[in-house]
Image (cartoon, helix red, strand yellow):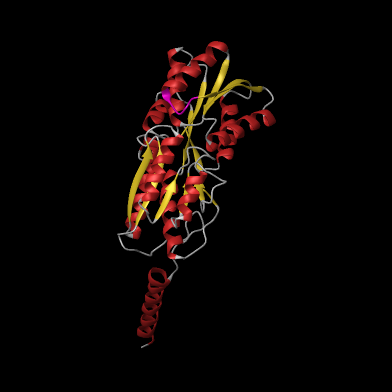
Amino acid sequence: MKKLLYVYIILFSLFSFYIYFFHLKENPISPFNQKSNRLQSEVTEKYVMVTFQAGIDYWKSAIKGFEDAANELNVSVEYRGATQYDVHEQITVLEQVIAKKPSGIAISAINPDMLNMTINKAIEAGIPVVLFDSDAPESDAYTFLGTDNYHSGVTSAHKMAEFIDGEGNVAVISLPEQLNHKERTNGFVETIEKEYPSIKVVAIKDGKGSQVESKQVTKEILNAAPNIKGIFATEANGGVGVAEAVQSLDYQEKIKIISFDTDKQTLDKIKEGQISATLAQGTWNMGYWSLQFLFQHNQGKQSLPEVVNTGVSIVTKENLEDYYAD
């Protein structure tokens, strides 16, 4: 009889354990201290993501995150973007989106100041807006989700110093009008100046987000200063353009290149040894949590954090294959 009683006790304990962990336990917390949202809405709700240079590979992971959140929440989503690197075109696209009165907008701002009026217009019309990837901090948007870009520049500076043994001349190819690229450049340059006295930043050039332009300005830099040992490109098209310029001048054995993001061209050039490293951003998180935050705001479930850091990691030949799957 005692043995049978022990069996019942064990079975009851196992059943209680199952109920707690699979039915009663709270939803898990995300890396950003947000509960995983299990609410759903009517599929008639539509949310829109707005970018620029809409056809580039960089946005694919963010769009996928946006779509994955939409599937969870049972809402519809649309992707719109300026086709060129043109602030006026992005403003026009955003105006068109506002006119359709969506349930919310997630936008990556091509310029930190020039979109403020249009973003604020959306909010005044009752359309919530969150920013991702590239911020417009003076706007009234509810939150920004993206990389800590200054820290990314710091990380790149330390990696570059490691690659060139702490001495030599280096250069930067960036986008000086875009806030996230300004911050990456500042983090890189200030870290070099403070911590590596034997390294000198001899040139900072505008690659205009273009492989062709970045290739051209890199050639100009190298023709003027052929003793450069490293180049930091703050975005993927720039990194590929830099690598093409270095290869065309047959300098690939002497110049280390650090790029940004994990598009296929960048990864291929790491595999081929033309780019030494790149920084991978949490772009899926940007898209996924942008939509989650917009939805949660509309449900009145929580106040939104002002800033969410979606993180970076360094990609080299050693861990390259992990990123092709993305």
Which quadrant would the N terminus be assigned to in this image? bottom left
Is residue 166 at all visible to an observer of this figure?
yes
The residue stretch that appears in magenta: 207-211
What is the quadrant of residue 191 in the picture? Answer: top right
Residue 183 located left or right of residue 277: right
The residue positioned 40% from the left and 37% from the top of the image is 58
Relative placement, left or right, of 70 versus 207 is: left
Seen at 47% across and 56% down, the residue is 30
281 in relation to 47, above or below? above
The secondary structure making up most of the magenta span is loop
Residue 273: tell me if it is visible: no
Please state the horizontal and vertical placement of residue 192, each as a whole percent of the image: 64, 29
Compared with 76, 169 (above or below) is above
Quadrant where the image shows the C terminus: top left
The answer to which of 27 and 18 lies nearer the viewer is 27
Q: Position of residue 112 (x, y in %)?
A: 53, 40
Question: Whole-percent x and y of residue 94?
Answer: 41, 44
